Image: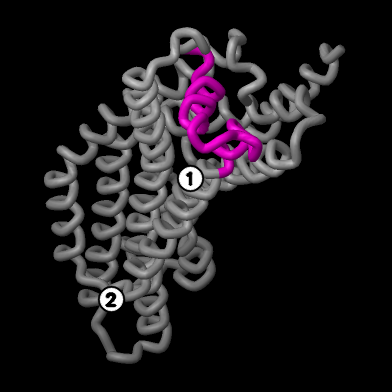
């Protein structure tokens, strides 16, 4: 990347990188300040229809956070090594890194230590925010998906109970049970939309930012086929990490949409005309689209990955066609 430090691409990429950090900070703070209200509605939905606790969700979130942090740290360390090389004297390392990674801001004759230190700190902050915004979306999606998994498991148990009439429930009690279950799905869908409203701007920012930098890495890879081994290693690992993180955001959020309708086939095959509440639940699950969205422009489902992949392939073909 340092080969393009004085180019228009470098200036544009730098503006997008730091602009993303600024907007990410604002949107993240907005989400954090709204968390008290969101957690109140989240807790209320849990109390309204008690479910078995998910004992694994805490462990999954800790593992996810650790993996994202470790991969982000490794990728950033490699970027610093690629920017300076291995032949850099220790006393010149800081200056070479700043001029290499931020050549769009400073020329070599303009470098001063009092300028380099703030730029260095700001770049680390921007990198942290870039990874943190994706991590927020992934963790919140995991929490919402966990609730749907527990709701679906409760539905399976109710279907099994009704099918075998295990507790000899009256028709009235069965209707009440199904009504409470249907209302729980309504509350969960409302919770997803409430959380999605607060996350939608951050989701849009995250996906646009990831798409741009994936395309940028592909462009730099095409134009830098030759170079030191560390640069090629960094390019492959950085591109792999960008793609993995972007896919992780989409797949984690797409699980919400998948699990919001996963119980519908079982209801349609096993519950024919049980009662009016079952019919209402089936209609509700069939036609109520529940998914996180990016400001109403797109929904985070698995088809989005194919659309983004198609856009990237078109971008690559255009680059190849016009490459001299």
Q: Residues within 10 Å of mark 2 (few under 14, many from 20)?
A: few
Q: Position of residue 161 (x, y in %)?
A: 36, 84
Residue sitting at x 67%, y 35% = 309
Residue 240 in the image: above or below residue 185: above
Return the residue at label 1.
249
When asked about the image quadrant of residue 35, the answer is top left
Position of the C terminus by quadrant: top right
Q: Are marks 2 and 1 in contact (CB under 8 Å)?
A: no
From the viewer's perspective, tell me whether residue 269 is left or right of residue 44. right
The secondary structure making up most of the magenta span is: helix
Residue drawn at (39%, 16%), measured in percent from left and top?
Answer: 112
Q: What is the C-alpha distance between the residues marked 2 and 1?
A: 26 Å
Quadrant of the image containing the N terminus = top right
Q: Position of residue 97 (x, y in %)?
A: 52, 29
Q: Nearer the viewer, mark 2 or mark 1?
A: 1
Which residues, given as a range, are shown in magenta? 78-105
Left or right of residue 95: residue 229: right
| Coloring basis for residues | one colour
Lateral position of residue 286 relative to residue 37, left or right: right
- Dot 1: element: helix
Expressed as whole percent of the image width and height from the top left, the position of residue 61 reads 37, 61
Residue 4 visible, this orientation: yes
Which residue: 35% across, 18% down? 115
**Of callouts 2 and 1, the N-terminal one:** 2
Question: Which SS class for mark 2?
Answer: loop
Report x, y in % for residue 251: 52, 49
Choose top left, top right, bottom left or bottom right for residue 225.
top right
The residue nearer to you, when weighing 143 against 15, is 15
Identify the residue under disc 2. Answer: 52
Numbered tag placed on residue 296 in the rendering:
none
């Amino acid at each position: 990347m340092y080969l393009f430090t004085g180019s228009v691409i470098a200036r544009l990429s730098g503006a997008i990188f730091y602009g993303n950090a600024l907007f990410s900070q604002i949107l993240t703070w907005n989400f954090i300040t709204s968390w008290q209200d969101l957690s109140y509605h989240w807790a209320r939905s849990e109390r309204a229809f008690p479910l078995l606790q998910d004992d694994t969700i805490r462990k999954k979130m800790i593992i996810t956070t650790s993996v994202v942090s470790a991969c982000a740290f490794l990728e950033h360390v490699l970027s610093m090594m690629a920017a300076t090389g291995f032949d850099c004297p220790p006393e010149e390392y800081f200056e070479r890194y700043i001029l290499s990674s931020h050549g769009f801001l400073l020329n070599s004759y303009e470098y001063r230590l009092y300028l380099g230190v703030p730029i260095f700190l700001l770049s680390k902050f921007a990198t942290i925010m870039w990874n943190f915004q994706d991590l927020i979306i992934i963790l919140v999606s995991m929490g919402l998906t966990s609730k749907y998994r527990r709701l679906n498991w409760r539905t399976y148990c109710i279907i099994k109970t009704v099918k075998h009439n295990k507790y000899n429930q009256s028709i009235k009690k069965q209707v009440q049970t199904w009504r409470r279950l249907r209302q729980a799905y309504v509350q969960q869908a409302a919770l997803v939309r409430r959380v999605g409203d607060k996350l939608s701007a951050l989701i849009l920012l995250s996906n646009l930012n990831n798409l741009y930098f994936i395309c940028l890495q592909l462009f730099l890879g095409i134009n830098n086929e030759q170079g030191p081994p560390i640069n090629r290693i960094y390019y492959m690992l950085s591109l792999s990490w960008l793609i993995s993180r972007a896919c992780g955001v989409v797949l984690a959020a797409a699980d919400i949409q998948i699990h919001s309708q996963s119980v519908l086939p079982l209801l349609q095959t096993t519950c024919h005309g049980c009662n009016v509440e079952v019919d209402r639940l089936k209609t509700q699950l069939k036609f109520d689209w529940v998914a996180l969205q990016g400001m109403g422009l797109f929904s985070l489902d698995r088809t989005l990955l194919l659309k983004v992949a198609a856009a990237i392939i078109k971008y690559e073909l255009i680059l190849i066609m016009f490459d001299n």
